[in-house]
Image (spheres, rainbow, N blue to C red):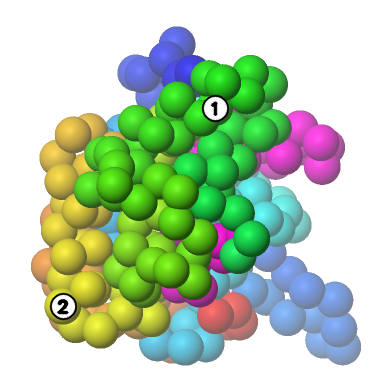
Amino acid sequence: MTAWSSTLDVPALELVDVVKRYPGEPPVSALDGVSLTVDRGEMVGIVGPSGSGKSTLLHIIGTLDRPTSGAVRLAGVDTSAMSDRQLSAVRSQLLGFVFQQFFLLEGMSALDNVANGLLYRGVAPAERRSAAEDALARVGLGHRLHHVPNKLSGGERQRVAIARAIVNRPAIVLADEPTGNLDSKSGAAVMDLIRELHGEGHTILIITHDRELADSLPRQVSVRDGRIEHDSGPHPVGVGSIEAGG
């Protein structure tokens, strides 16, 4: 199920001179020549206040939006010129998403919510459910397989979302404010789990406005006042300006 096993020697993520402009009079530059490299197995916090541009970075990295120009490579795969259908395939194979709002289907069990993470991979139903069961056991919810979301706590729902994100063994897990809707105890438990996953070799990007959380991560990319102002990692090059975005 690992779609990128042949590209283990390349970075998990490369943004090269990425520009994002939105139409208007004048046009709004959301990203202006931003370059960022994340090696396989890193855990990186992209941190900045609301309006700093980090949401634009999330959308570009997650192939949820297209750059105006520049290269976006995921595990060596250049996504910049892909069709919508090709991008959907890339998302299903190379990316796992964890969102603040969980985005679980309320009428489905935890098992089926996680199995849906493999729906567009062409995996047989029995194999999807088996992989989902393994992923839920990995996040400590082996005893909650058949519970629907409204029967789970906030922390448990986020664990289901994390299981869904890792079930396809993605190149990158993108976590957008993963503790934002949780109390401090549940949030700490979720972050402990994310750190465990990182320790097992997962590449994880955490987008957050929480400076304390970002300070606890091995690498931090700071976005503020329209610029990536600091990158504590090994590839702090090509830093460009950002004037709009989340």
Residue type at numbered disc 2:
Lys
Q: Quadrant of residue 169?
A: top left
Q: Which residues are magenta?
A: 78-105
187 vs 58, left or right, is: left
219 falls in the magenta region: no
Residue 148, x across and y down, in percent: 50, 60
Q: Amino acid at mark 1?
A: Arg
Foreground residue among 126 and 68:
126
Residue 73 visible somewhere in the drawing: no
Locate residue 172 relative to residue 82 in the image: left or right: left
Q: Is residue 141 above or below residue 2?
A: below
Q: Tell me which residue sits at (24%, 53%) in the image.
A: 194
125 in relation to 149, above or below: above
Quadrant location, the C terminus: bottom right
- Answer few, some or many: residues within 10 Å of disc 1's Cα (few below 14, many 20 plus, some between 14 and 19): many
How many residues crowd around disc 2 within 10 Å: few (fewer than 14), some, or many (20 or more)?
A: few
Q: Position of residue 78 (x, y in %)?
A: 62, 32
For the residues labelled 1 and 2, say whether their Cβ atoms are less than 8 Å apart. Answer: no
Residue at the spot 63% in from the left edge and 18% down from the top edge? 124
**In the image: residue 128, left or right of residue 158:** right
Give the residue at mark 1: 128
Which labelled disc corresponds to residue 142?
none
Tell me which label, 1 or 2, sits earlier in the chain.
1
Q: Is residue 42 left or right of residue 153?
A: left
Could you say where residue 19 lies in the image, as x and y percent from the top left? 64, 60
